[in-house]
Image: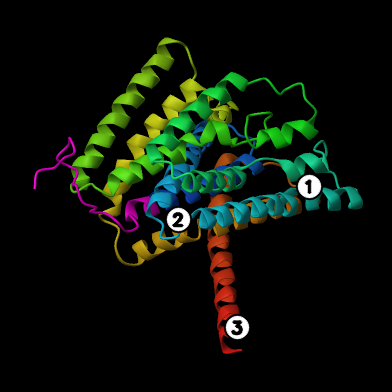
Amino acid sequence: MKNSLSLPVFSNEEVNAKRQFEYDVAKAFAIVFMILVHTVDQITAGEGALYCAIEFFGCAPSACVFMMSMGLGIVFTRHRSPRDFLLRGAKLLIAAYLLNFFRETLLLILGNALNVENDYQGVSLYASLMAVDILHFAGLSFLFVALCERLKLKNWAVLLIAIAFSGISNLCLGAFGGLSEYAQYPLGLLFYANSETCFPFFAWFIYPAIGMCLGSLLRHVSDKNRFYACIFALGASSLFLVSSGCAALNIDIAGLFMTTKYYMQDLVTLMWCLSLVFTLLPLYYWLSLVVRGKAKDGVEYLSANVNLIYIVQWLVICYFIAVLEIFDVGTFPTWAGAGIGVLIMAACLLISIGVNKIKQNVKKAKSHE
């Protein structure tokens, strides 16, 4: 039967209906980069070429790729009713605020009670509890997808809404700086309000929205090699053009991922990050073709437990910093910070395995009751 779609890489029928391993690879790399960048950001002075390289891999290759992979996961999940997305979003939002409390607010309370000097003494308890991070964004995204599913919106319509959100976000940049922090942080869930509103929904939802559209296409792709070759050509050429444009206009590319412009996601930053993501996704696909055996099992474990590992890594990092504060240990050089990041990564894996075993034992105990 002749394809009704315009490109021969597509099929009329669904060819890829199950979970796609290349996005497990993408999420696995994302969590590794995130742990490294969070560790280095927190315990080093933030200098040198190695620091810049870690910051680079901690931006679009991690958070942006993760968000687009989240959109793809929405398309391929078996649990896609509005209620499923609503519950998932609510759980993520609750987890986000609990994480804020245990990784910073509780430590501030203890530090103030014990009169221990620390780097966060200028932060209010309210700000520490209400800071906006990627878990908040993920929770809001699933809540919005629940609404879209309830309204039976097509993925292309969701993308159009996301583009409109991005435009509104750009128009609102700088609009909330004069407000009190009690107003900034709730607004920061939707808009960039201050430096602690890291992933505002309006600025960042375009990534999962694109992932949803990409996932809809991928379900009909009969020749994934050609499909990803086209994606790579698009991403690499766009990355070259955007980077060349930045150079011509004297825009510092490092500033797109090493300053708050990254969280703001203005038009230039968005174009550069999207170009980089589309360049990387095919690389993850081609890498997925050669990952086998225990390496594949490890990648699938990281992908399936990405939320748990994300939460654990922040707790490990922040309580490690608390110990450093108690013993008055200064900052580390970047290379040492990267090494500590690797050790924290290993600790997070071991803790996550332990947590999962406890969950399994609890389920077994309940099943025998």
Residue 119, position as x, y percentages in the image: 77, 40
Callout in the foreground (3, 1) = 3
Which type of secondary structure does the marked residue at label 1 adopt?
Answer: loop
Residue at mark 1:
328
Which type of secondary structure does the marked residue at label 2 adopt?
Answer: loop
Residue found 34% across the figure and 41% down from its top: 214
Residue found 33% across the figure and 23% down from its top: 240
Q: Which stretch did the figure color magenta?
A: 1-25
Residue at mark 3:
366
Is residue 95 visible in the rendered image? The answer is yes
Cα separation between marks 3 and 1: 46 Å
Is disc 2 surrounded by few (<14), some (14 to 19) or many (20+) residues within 10 Å?
Answer: some
Callout in the foreground (2, 1) = 2
Q: What's the amino acid at mark 3?
A: Lys
Residue found 39% across the figure and 50% down from its top: 75
Q: Choose the circle earlier in sequence order: 2 or 1.
A: 2
Would you place residue 162 above or below residue 34 in this image?
above
Q: Quadrant of the C terminus?
A: bottom right
Q: Which of 147 and 121 is in front in this view?
A: 147
6 part of magenta stretch: yes
